[in-house]
Amino acid sequence: MRKIRITGTGNYLPELVVTNQMMSEIVETSDEWILTRTGIAERRLSSGEPTWYMGAQAARLAISEAGLSGEDIDLIIVTTITPDYYTPSTACIIQSEINAGKAACFDINAACTGFVYALDMAARYLMSDDIRHILIVSTENISKIVDYSDRSTCVLFGDGASAVVCSRPSDQDESAMLATVLGSEGQGGQYLYSKALDVKHPFIKKEQVWPDRFGQQDDHYVNMDGQEVYKFAIRALSDSVLKVIRKANVSIDELRYIIPHQANSRIVNAAARRMKADPQQIISRMSDFGNTSSASIPICLDELIRSGRLRRGEKVALCGFGAGLTYGAAIFIY
Ligand code: UT7
């Protein structure tokens, strides 16, 4: 068992609300199609706020909620697939925004599973003596990589950020990570991807230009085989939760909540049926926010904590899936 206590959380959701009706004014779709196929009614989109800004705003709230200052943070892990720069990392930019002078900083990319990967890492780092407080920031401006003329993807995504401070608890504190299950299926990479820059310099010959691995056009837009991802998602969600439950040696009804990645309510409902979970346990918020990639799980977690619906000592399962293909689940005692 790895001791880890969530001491503070915070969200940043852009003010701009884009409804399904507004979507139907830019692509051939309807509120009815989007709602019945995905459960999404509206999403927030950035009005130009960069990814680092949204992350820093969420981080400030989480640190203050934890009763800490930036100086107390030993490590910043940012999860994002939509950074503003290749370098410096988004974590370094957020560090300078929140004056976390002594923190080590890096970004990870595990797509929509990013937060689950980061939480697993945080619990492992907290086992070492020299790390007491870790800030995880999941921040995504997915709108940067969405093609708003492609109705099969543009209706799904939203922008947002969330931050969580994880601290080393006292010996008497029961807060802990009970188990995690992480995995990837790299052979499914072509089902969901967004392309970065090609190798291009003055000494390269035309015949040396490599074809794109996934065969995409020359843009950076999200390219998705929705049905393949759909099948993977149901399997990955239910299998990883069932696996992590066995590993943690708890039964499904001991879980106060199960927070799945918020991609599609049909995926979540089908996975819930497969794992025989009580629908009351499942958190489903995609109706208001759409799919915010790695930010989706911690946004829900922050809402549960702030509203007082999650109490100390209760057990929670998180489960993510996404591009990579990646998946992961975790069970912790809050
Ligand atoms: O973080 C992980 C991210 N990705 C996911 O979680 C995506 C997983 N996949 C899905 O959620 C679903 O596959 C979608 C919601 C993307 C699509 O739902 P579907 O039930 O699998 O629809 P489909 O792809 O089979 O398309 C059915 C029809 C097609 O028309 P035809 O060929 O039957 O005439 C599409 O062109 O629906 C059409 N369609 C739309 N119609 C209205 C696709 N997008 C739209 C749209 N509005 N926005």
Image (tube, helix red, strand yellow):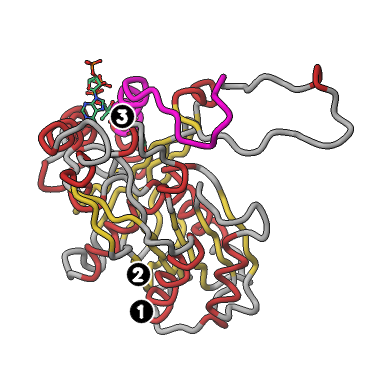
Three-letter code for the amino acid on which mark 2 is drawn:
Gly
Type of the residue with mark 1:
Glu
Residue at image coords 39%, 22%: 225
Q: Residues within 10 Å of mark 1 (few under 14, many from 20)?
A: some
Q: Whole-percent x and y of residue 289? A: 25, 52
Is 168 in front, or is 189? 189
Q: Is residue 30 left or right of residue 94?
A: left
Mark 2–mark 1 CB contact (< 8 Å): yes
Residue 65 x, y percent position in the rendering: 35, 79
Residue located beneath label 3 in the image: 152
Residue occupying the point 89% across, 32% down = 203
Tell me where residue 52 appears, x and y as whole percent.
51, 64
**Residue at 44 percent of width and 57 percent of height:** 138
Q: Distance between the residues labelled 2 and 1?
A: 8 Å
Say which mark, if any, is on residue 10: 2
> Mark 3 is on which residue type?
Ser
Q: Would residue 202 be counted in the magenta stretch?
A: no
First-in-chain label (2 vs 1): 2
Tell me how far mark 3 sits from mark 1, CA to CA. 39 Å
Q: Nearer the viewer, residue 90 or 185?
A: 90
Q: Disc 3, ligand 1: is the CB inside 8 Å?
A: yes
The residue indicated by pointer 1 is 65
Residue 236 belongs to magenta span? yes
The C terminus: image quadrant: bottom left
Viewer-nearest of discs 3 and 1: 3
